[in-house]
Image: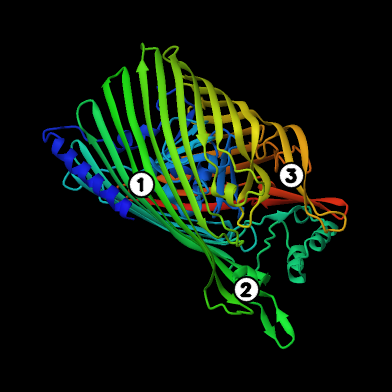
Amino acid sequence: MKKYLFAVAMLCSTIAYAQKAIAPDSIKTVDLKEIVVSSTRATTKTPMTFNEIKQEEIEENNTGKDLPYLLEMTPSAVTTSDAGAGVGYTGIRIRGSDPARVNVTLNGIPYNDPESQQVFWVNLPDFASSVSSIQVQRGLGTSTNGAGAFGASVNIETKGLNRNSYATLDNSIGSFNTRKHTAMFGTGLIADKFAFDGRLSQITSDGYVDRATTDLKSYFLSGGYYGQKSLVKFNIFSGHETTYQAWYGVPESRMDHDVDEMNAYVARNFIGSADSLNLLNSGRTYNQYTYDNEIDDYDQTHYQLISAFDLSETITLNVSAFLIHGEGYFEQYKTDRDLADYGLNDITIGTETITSTDLIQRRWLNNNFYGTTFSLDYLPNNGFKFTLGGAWNQYNGDHFGKVIWAQYASNGTIRHPYYFNNSLKKDFNIFGKAIYNLSDQLSLFGDLQYRTVDYTMEGDDNDAQTIDQSHNYNFFNPKFGVKLQLNDQSSAYASVAIGSKEPVRNDFTDNVSTATPKAEKMTDLEIGYNRKTTKYTFNANLFWMDYKDQLVVTGELNDVGSSLRTNVDKSYRAGIELQLGYQLADKLKLNTNVSFSQNKIDGYNETIYNYGIGWDEYNADVISYGKTDIAFSPNVVAGGNLEYSPINGLNLRWIHKYVGEQFLDNTSTDSRKLDAYYVSDAIATYTLTGNSFKSISLKFAVYNLFNQMYSANGYTWGYRGGGEEIRENFYYPQAGTNFMIGLNIKL
């Protein structure tokens, strides 16, 4: 915290100095978007692959589902939902890359959890209501802050200055008792200098999966000073989530309604009578958890101090400081747990010794993530732009567990602590990027980034294993490209980039091999063509992402639902992404995209545990495969929508999504895969405008219009024993046909 306060003090000093340096007769108001997010965003001159989602499109699709569902129409994107209805724990994969490979920044400030590198959208409920634009760069993209982008980067900009006062009420209700209530307000520009904005939100849902309830609350407050050549803005936003756990998934036999296989599953996994009845009597919405408070309860608060200045006609400066505080737990009911595993003594009563107990445990996280970001833009003329940017941040996180109840308490007390460990991670990066126009038709791009990471873990994990270790990484990530303006309507580009990425916490703590997980390296080649006319837009992009020591998921999960990973020597992703927007008629528009790819590992070794014929051994068998498909990497992903506006104020959209088959592990085994699926949605919006209000919009959405029974995610694990090989597959079923209806009033 002292270092955070020091960073804030340095920022305030910078602001004070810059304010003195600014001439009082300046006439240009700083554009927050141009200054704050431009250093990590691509532009029309950047030879990179990207899409941008504007505020109007965000508002059209924001009915309460988590933010990944607002991005699922971007090329190569696949969304998932643990609870099956798009609310709660959700995720997005882009080009087959999992969320730990998707870099996310909020106003240029890193958001990925530094340890897992995951993006927990559930901690930012209804954040989309405070967003003005989102840019999705695929591949390595331009240099950014925070976790390395190994499949994509998502750059989110919150709403900027609104010169006029406003108030908005946005309410939606729908299937599974899903409700979204949002109130927003803004003062407009006060005394030509100040503006304040706010939002309060609540989203609740029973979920599609049994008991997978969600209760999300959030707020967003922002106040800014808008000078003629300066801006100072403070954002504070927070989310509190309480979700009933649904991360275990549904066994394959339950999905197939195969009673014999369900009974076999019960027998080989020693499932008790109550749990077996739950399995047999449920449908595809089965949830293993039945304890009434098997919940995840977490609170996360963000503080952002953002400043931007025009230091001269050619130089602009942005400096930001941030703090993210997170604190919460997940609670679990456990049966027949060894007392010794919790630091508790065995109990002797007469001649009987009790060595195990039923109990309720809470596993806690308490962390602070803080730091600074900066960028200095130099634009001497229209033919050259140079940006010097970077960030420093530190993460300090405690992991600990408590027993809040036990059938046999032994020597424990209420909230008995049974493990504790701390992680400290420091991250620094600096980059310089430049665009130089050789002519009106030809632009050159260069981007050099240096990043260093120090990561230390100390203490005992929940399995009583000591995890003391320290790791240091130094990465150099160069990127180069060229863009050619062929004519007024067409352009082409090519780029090559090299990126590196450190392992995540679970790669170290859940590592079952003796080898230390290696950092990954990737070379990304992108070649693209864009054409835009008054009638249509067309984009085509070829990519080749060549990996060294890629960390791929094995198909298994650890005890908190996170994927286990292993290094593979050589692997690649190669494909083509096509986008078309076509004005079919005056009131009829088509937008569509499709991605074709190959995602391969050049030789994969699977480790499977062998307990022997008599279940009295413990060996690790290695099965070697040739070239295989990377898990969760469909060869075909397509999406699109047909939009029709028959009369003023009425908008009708028919939305389509197709995802090809995906394998649950890296063996390309047909018995361990997700089937291809096609989903169609329909959304109708009618908007009225008037004198006493800005607008009133009524929205009706039907999701999964044709009631497709599909799963968008899953996992698998296996073992050998008793002379046979057992494989267990689990799936996360998604909801059939469901609806939402919403009313939005803007004053």
User: Within 10 angstroms of label 1, few (less than 14), some, or many (20 or more) residues?
Assistant: many
In the image, which is nearer the foreground, mark 2 or mark 3?
3
| Disc ID at residue 371 | 1
Q: Position of residue 457 (x, y in %)?
A: 50, 53
Give the left or right position of residue 716, taking residue 215 as reference: right
Query: Nearer the N terminus, badge 1 or badge 3?
Result: 1
The kind of secondary structure element at disc 2 is strand
Q: Residue at x 53, y 78 (%)?
A: 413
Report if the CB atoms under discs 2 and 3 are less than 8 Å apart. Answer: no
Query: Nearer the N terminus, badge 2 or badge 3?
Result: 2
In the image shown, does 267 or 69 lie closer to the viewer?
267
Instruction: Give the position of the N terminus as an image quadrant.
Output: bottom left
> From where the camera sits, is residue 114 visible?
no
Examine the rendered structure and indicate whether residue 695 appears above or below residue 260: above
Q: Which amino acid type is shown beneath numbered disc 3?
A: Thr
Q: Position of residue 48 (x, y in %)?
A: 47, 25
Identify the residue position indicated by label 3 in the image.
607
Report if the CB atoms under discs 1 and 2 are less than 8 Å apart. Answer: no
In the image shown, does 627 or 213 lie closer to the viewer?
627
Q: Position of residue 277 (x, y in %)?
A: 76, 68
Identify the residue position indicated by label 2 in the image.
359
| Disc ID at residue 302 | none
